[in-house]
């Protein structure tokens, strides 16, 4: 979907439609790959898929985002519905899949709000936060709980609170140092969001709402600098000061931006540049792009591993993960995974990566011995 089609005058300006529209478009053209759980050895220490964990029959937009709780070695994966008709989102999607990271087995799913999208973990408090996108204001889903953030207890894997936020919560990020949770509000068919909700994790209340530019999409927090980065539907990125919850800067990467990751020193920001199939390397001191690194087609998720200095990028249209050496800024490996890999996460205690595959309804587990 082009930027021209997504001007402010359009009724359906819900930022998450980018994912939903594309997800359903390929749903009928791609053959679902087999999801057979398997364990393999890692040859010569190369990054390798050591397991593929099936989560059930493919549904809606498929398995979308993963978040790891290193404290319990548990993986959480969201499964949003799809844009199945002109009247709104699928009203049957409420589940978050739960994976035991020690055995790669699927546990009982957790029922949350309508259309769970973003998910993030605070390992300090052992809380998991899920953004429920809702039905975008359409009557077909008006009776469903939506526009909320579900709070999950990491010990019991049960919902302990539901926080009402603004229209169209999409992605969520946590700063464990400040116990603040940030949620992008993309609006819906009937109202604009264009904001980031700030939640106090100690009280589970919205304490601030930061107005940003059109179509806030993905949010990421750098705990080292206490800066919050928000990508939008286009090439713009907003930087929020986490101490004051005010906009500090905006900048462009020259391409439609997706996920964001940070190096361990807080010097560089890595942004998936979706339209040009590159990873943008941004100097955090002046918010300028210093290099583009070619990756696969339609990069989406990005994760940095401080243990080995490598960056991992999911390439949605290739079904691969690019592995980048941050010191040389070059791709050192390309790992095949499942269909339409989205937003991955890393367990920093085990150094295992978890990649949600949308069209397979599965999670690939990557081990990198480097």
Image (cartoon, helix red, strand yellow):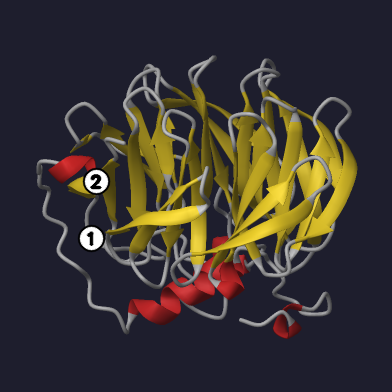
Quickly name the residue at label 1.
57
Of the image marks 2 and 1, the number of the one nearer the N terminus: 2
Q: Quadrant of the C terminus?
A: top left
Quickly name the residue at label 2.
46
Q: Could you tell me which secondary element the residue under label 2 belongs to?
A: loop
- Residue lying at 35% horizontally and 40% vertically, measured from the top left: 353
- Relative to 192, is 22 above or below? below
Tell me the crowding category of disc 1: few under 14, some 14 to 19, or many 20 or more residues within 10 angstroms, Cα based.
few
- Residue 285 visible in this rendered orientation of the protein: yes
Viewer-side residue, 188 vs 270: 270
C-alpha distance separating marks 2 and 1: 31 Å
**Left or right relative to 321: residue 126:** right
Q: Quadrant of the N terminus?
A: bottom right
Indicate the position of residue 201 as horizontal and vertical percent values. Answer: 66, 21
- Relative to 40, is 244 above or below? above
Indicate the position of residue 71 as horizontal and vertical percent values. Answer: 40, 17
Viewer-side residue, 119 vs 102: 102
Tell me the crowding category of disc 2: few under 14, some 14 to 19, or many 20 or more residues within 10 angstroms, Cα based.
some
Indicate the position of residue 259 as horizontal and vertical percent values. Answer: 58, 53
């Amino acid at each position: 979907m082009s930027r021209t089609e997504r001007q402010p005058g359009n009724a359906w300006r819900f930022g998450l439609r980018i994912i939903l529209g594309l997800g359903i478009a390929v749903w009928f053209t791609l053959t679902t790959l087999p999801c057979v759980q398997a364990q393999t050895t890692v040859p010569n220490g190369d990054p390798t898929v050591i397991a593929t964990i099936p989560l059930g029959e493919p549904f809606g937009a498929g398995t979308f985002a993963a978040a790891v709780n290193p404290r319990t070695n548990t993986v959480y994966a969201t499964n949003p519905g799809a844009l199945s008709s002109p009247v709104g989102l699928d009203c049957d999607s409420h589940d978050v899949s739960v994976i035991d990271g020690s055995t790669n087995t699927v546990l009982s799913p957790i029922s949350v709000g309508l259309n769970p999208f973003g998910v993030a973990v605070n390992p300090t408090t052992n809380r998991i936060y899920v953004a429920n996108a809702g039905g975008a204001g359409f009557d077909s889903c008006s009776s469903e709980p939506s526009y909320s953030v579900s709070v999950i207890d990491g010990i019991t894997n049960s919902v302990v609170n539901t926080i009402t936020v603004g229209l169209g919560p999409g992605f969520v990020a946590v700063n464990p140092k400040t116990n603040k949770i940030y949620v992008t509000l993309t609006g819906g068919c009937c109202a604009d969001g264009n904001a980031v909700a700030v939640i106090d994790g100690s009280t589970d209340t919205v304490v601030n709402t930061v107005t940003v530019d059109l179509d806030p999409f993905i949010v990421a927090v750098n705990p080292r600098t206490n800066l919050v980065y928000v990508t939008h539907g286009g090439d713009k990125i907003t930087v929020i000061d986490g101490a004051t919850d005010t906009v500090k800067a905006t900048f462009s990467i020259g391409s439609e931006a997706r996920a964001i990751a940070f190096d361990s020193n807080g010097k560089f920001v890595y942004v998936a540049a979706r339209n040009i199939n590159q990873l943008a390397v941004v100097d955090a001191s002046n918010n300028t792009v210093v290099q583009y690194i070619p990756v696969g087609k339609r990069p989406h998720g990005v994760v940095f591993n401080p243990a080995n200095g490598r960056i991992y990028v999911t390439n949605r249209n290739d079904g691969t993960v690019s592995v980048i050496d941050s010191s040389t800024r070059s791709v050192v490996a390309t790992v095949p995974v499942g269909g339409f890999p989205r937003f991955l996460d890393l367990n920093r205690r085990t150094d295992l990566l978890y990649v949600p595959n949308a069209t397979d309804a599965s999670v690939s587990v990557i081990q990198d011995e480097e």
